[in-house]
Image (tube, rainbow, N blue to C red):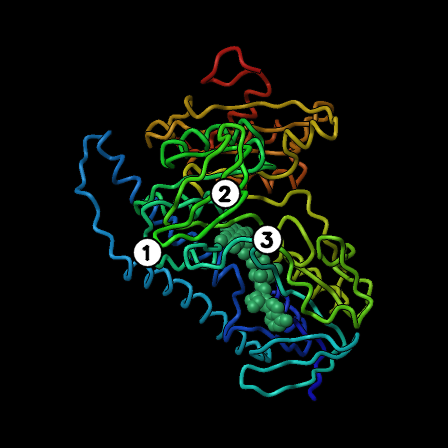
Amino acid sequence: MSQTRVLVIGGGPGGYPAAFLAADLGCQVTLVEHKANPGGVCLFQGCIPSKALLHVTRLLNETREASEFGVEFAPPKIDLAKLRGWKDSVVSTLTGGLGQVSRARKVRMIQGQARLEDAHTALVRRSDGAEEKVSFDYAILAAGSSPARIPGLPSSKRVMDSTAALEIPDVPGSLLVVGGGYIGLELGSVYAALGSKVTVVEMTSGLLPGADRDLVTHLAQRVGHKFHAVHLNTRVAEMTEEPDGIRVKLLGLDLPDSTPKFDKVLVSVGRKPNSRELGLEKTAVEIDDKGFIRVDRQRRTREPSIFAIGDLTGEPMLAHKATYEGRVAAQVIARQPSSFDPKAIPAVVFTDPELAWAGLTESQARSQQREVKIARFPWSASGRATTLGRNDGLTKVIVDPYNEQVLGVGIVGVGAGEMIAEAVLAIEMGARATDLMLTIHAHPTLSETLMEAAEVYFGHSPHLVGRR
Ligand code: FAD
C-alpha cells in the first residue's frame, strides 16, 4: 500500500502534463502508465509517428513534382527498415526525454495497469507482476482511447488499425482505407507515397465529416490524384480473408454490387474511450452512452476526488485539448482558479495540403442559424503560394457582422497547420477583422492570406477585384 496526494492514471498528452504541473505546484504525484515512459497514444502510436512518416511523404511527393520546376530526381529507393527505424528513433527520443523530465520532477512513475477500487484507492498491477494498492487524495483519469472496430471483421494480419499501420510492416500493392476521417487520410497518404494503390471508402457524403466543404474540396482534388479511388456514401458490408488478399463487399451509391480484393485493409473508423477497464462502477463517476466520462468545467467528475481529462472526456479527441484539460485539473487540485473554457480549439489534418480550422465553422454557423459574414482569400492570388507552386489553398474568416469579431478561421493549403495558431490567438483575444487587416504580415508569406481574407471582408483586397 502506498499513499499519494495525486494519482494520475495514463501518461499521454493529458496525463503527463497534468502530473508534471501538479508536481510543479507542490503536490506529491504518482503516475501509472502501461508503458515504461510517458507519451501515450500521441507519442507512441499517433501524432508523432504519423507526422514523422508524413514528413517523408511530403519529401517524396515534392521530389516527384519538382520536374514541373525543371528539376528531375531519380525515382527514390525506399529502405523500409531504415524508415521504420528513423520513425521509432523519433518516438524513443521524445518519450525517453519525458521519462527523464518525470524523474527530475520527482513524479513517481509506476509501469502497470491501474483500476479504481473506490473513490480514494486504486489497485495497480505492476509490470513486474506485483500488485500495489495506491491510496490517493485526488485522481486524474487520463486513460485515453483505442481504435474503434467494425463488428464482424476477420481477425487477420491483413486487416490493420492505425497502430498496426504505423509499423509499416510492408508496402502492400493495394490498400483499402475504411473511413475518410483525418487518420485514414493521413495514413492513406503515407502508403500512397510509398507506392500502394490506395482506395478510400467513406460512409458519409464527404471526406472529413465536420470540416467545411469548401476547404475539403481543395484537399479532395489533390487526394483524388494521389489515391487510386475515393468512394463516398459507401460502407463495408463484409470482409473475407482469401489466401492472397482480403475480399471486401462494398455497398455504395456508385458501387451497387462490388467485391474487390485488397492486399491489406486499414480500418480507421474513429476511436472509443478506454473507460470500461477503470473500475468506475466502484465510484460515482458517470459515463455517457458513448463511454465518455462526464466532467464539469474544472474537469471534475461526479466523484469529488476524481477528475478526468483527454480522450476519455470526449470530442475533440486531440492531444492539445487533453493537455489543456490536464493543466486545468492540476491547477484545480492545487487550489488555483482554473476552468476549461476555450473559445477555439484548433484542428489540423496533416495531409498535403494541410487543412486546419479554429473557432466557429461555417457549417456550425449554419446549423445554429447564426448570422455570420464570410470572407475568402483564394491562394491563387497569393504571391508566396505561387512561388511554392502551391496555389491550391484557401483562407477564410468567419466574422460576426454586428461587431466584426473574428469567430472562426478555416485554412487549407501547405503549412495551414502552423498558420492556424495566429487565428486561435485572434479568436481567443477577441480580435476583430480590422485587427487582422491592420496587423502587418511579412511578405511574401502564406500568413498574409489571413490579413488578405480580412481585407476581402472589407471589400478592398489589393489582389482581388470586386470581392466582398
Ligand atoms: P492517450 O494518449 O490515449 O494516453 C492514454 C494512456 O493511458 C496510454 O498511454 C495508455 O497506455 C494509458 N492507460 C490506459 N489505461 C490505463 C490504465 N488502466 N492504467 C495505466 N495506464 C493506462 N491528436 C492531435 O492533436 N494531433 C495529431 O496530429 C494527432 N494524430 C493522431 C494520429 C493517430 C494515428 C492517432 C491514433 C491519434 C492522433 N491524435 C492526434 C489523437 C491523440 O493521439 C489523442 O487525442 C491523444 O493522445 C489523447 O491523449 P490522452 O492523454 O487523452 O490519452
Q: Can you give x and y, in whole percent of width and height, for residue 314 in the image? A: 68, 52
First in residue order: circle 3 vs circle 2: 3
Q: Can you give x and y, in whole percent of width and height, for residue 201 in the image? A: 49, 39
Residue at 74% across, 65% down: 307
Name the residue tied to disc 1.
170
Q: Dot 1: few (<14), some (14–19), or many (≥20) neighbours within 10 Å?
A: few
Q: Nearer the viewer, residue 60 or 179?
A: 179
Query: Considering the image in quadrants, where does the N terminus appear?
Result: bottom right
Name the residue tied to disc 2.
349
Tell me the amino acid under the disc marked 3.
Pro
Name the residue tied to disc 3.
151
| Dot 1: element | loop
- How many angstroms separate mark 3 from mark 2 (CA)? 27 Å
Q: Can you give x and y, in whole percent of width and height, for residue 277 in the image? A: 67, 69
Tell me the amino acid under the disc marked 2.
Val
Q: Is mark 3 within 8 Å of ligand 1?
A: no
